[in-house]
Image (cartoon, helix red, strand yellow):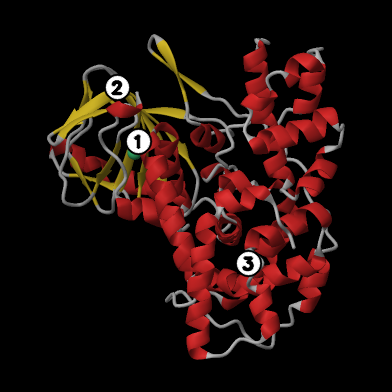
Amino acid sequence: MYRNYAKQDVFSNEVGLTVRLASMNTSTTSLDTEEAEDSAVSDESLLIAVGNTQDINAFNQLFERFSKKIFALGMKLTRNEQLANDLIQEAMLNVWQKAPLYDLDKGSAKGWIFTLSRNRCFDMLRKQKRQPSTISADDIWPLESGAEPASVHDDMAGQQVELSLIEGYFDQLSDPQRAVVEQIYIKDRTHEEAAAYLQIPLGTLKSRLRLGVAKLRNLIGVDQ
Amino acid sequence: MNTEVKLHPSTELLNQFIQGELVTGKSVVVSAHMELCKSCRAKAEELQAHAVSSWVDPGSALQSDQPSEVDYSSMLASIVKSPQIKSEPIEELVEIDIDVLNHSIKLPKVLAKAASEGLQWKKVAGGISEAHLFLDNETLCEFIYMAPGCQVPVHTHQGSESTLVLDGSFEDELGEYKASDFIIRDGQHNHQPRSKEGCLCFAVLDSPLKFTEGLARLMNPINSYKFKKATSRLA
Ligand SMILES: [Zn+2]
């Protein structure tokens, strides 16, 4: 289904978790086949489908899986049913909007959704308590990207590096990095096309590209 | 530099931070410490992973039933009509340097953002200056600068005070504190901070200080007035 090479190594522990949840379920009620099939698709695959192809069905499944959790988190933090319901809206809207930015290399989908939900809840409460907006949740819990959002594409093009020279260093990149650099610089695909082809989130594509290009430049000896 | 950090937020406090349970002022001071402290960042990552797995655990105590009469289909339909964000918005970087005596101190990002509307420094007593930040209605947040050789009157706290040392050092009866150290004081401590080399801190108080000695007692009413003023601007 939504298969990709990265999922296996990054989320190998996911398998254990799924099995544990499934066995807990069977002990109480029997699952119907459709539900069992759904739970076999990882949260990450669903999120990637939402980010790469605006897959509404995948989004509905994420909503199904997470809305109750988000509501519970909202109840815990706000003790207010209305606010907790508003949080479902705010957080799931954020999941939809930011899905292309999700980076597979930096954590699980549920961790990412937790972070978005907590942050939206924090901002909602600040607004409700009429606190100043100088500071927001995203300042308090910054994304550990450490990345300059500058376009890597333009950057590299300006360097006029011989393609053959780069190719000589290709095997020193990790497989995921090489795949990404190849899509962008050799196949000349757009970021969106490459992410869809490799079935990784756009955010992951960009961070792998950045790391891959930095490594190549380092090997070639181009000044940073 | 990271390895020299001696004092960190407790695991409990870090956990509350991760769970989003702390009020804005407290969240900011913990976040600022984490920006300076690698080991707390690593610890927070572990705590977050733990928080996430108990969040999604179907057997978790954190379960609430959604009211069944709510129809989510229109919510879903409106969400999927919104445009998606394809690249991380370029953040405007706020940088603030605070000049003291013979050098300037670059604030951690979260504090620079918090102070982005400007700092108004006021001299309070022998060599101490303060600049308040209004972050929420429950805490008093301020930058405190102690000039070399100055001393704060003996005081206790009604609530708790979290202090992050940003530059220089200070000491009290319990020890010496250096840049990046995170110190918590509460009602049990009766302390008198002093600084030989000068010190810049960011402090978040749950409730006003209570001075306990001599003439300093006269400052009590003023002090709680200051607290009210700082925390009731929008209330
Ligand atoms: Zn620390």
The quarter in which the N terminus of chain B is drawn is top left
Marks 3 and 1 sit apart, C-alpha to C-alpha, by: 32 Å
Question: What residue is at 74 percent from the left and 66 percent from the top?
Answer: A59
User: Label 1 lies in what chain?
Assistant: B
Question: What residue is at 81 percent from the left and 62 percent from the top?
Answer: A55
Out of A173 and B152, give the one closest to the viewer. Answer: A173
Out of B1 and A21, give the one closest to the viewer. Answer: A21
Q: Tell me whether circle 3 and circle 1 mark residues in contact (CB < 8 Å).
A: no
Tell me the mark number nearer the camera, choosing from 3 and 1.
3
Q: Within 8 Å: ligand 1 and the Cβ of disc 2?
A: no
Q: Earlier in the sequence, mark 2 or mark 1?
A: 2
Circle 1 is placed at which residue position?
B164
Question: What residue is at 57 percent from the left and 90 percent from the top?
Answer: A30
Question: What residue is at 62 percent from the left and 75 percent from the top?
Answer: A82
Both labels 3 and 1 in a single chain: no
Percent x, y of residue A178: 70, 32
Could you say which disc has been placed on residue B127 in the image? 2
User: Label 3 lies in what chain?
Assistant: A
Location of ligand 1 given as a quarter of the image: top left
Up-down relation of residue A88 to residue A163 (above or below): below
**Would residue B216 be visible to someone looking at this image?**
yes
Up-down relation of residue B135 to residue A210 (above or below): below
Circle 3 is placed at which residue position?
A87
Tell me the mark number nearer the camera, choosing from 2 and 1.
1
Q: Tell me whether circle 2 and circle 1 mark residues in contact (CB < 8 Å).
A: no
Residue type of the residue flagged with mark 2: Gly
Decide: few, some or many residues near mark 2? Use Cα within 10 Å; few <14, some 14-19, many ≥20: some
> For numbered disc 2, what is the local secondary structure?
loop
Q: How many marks?
A: 3
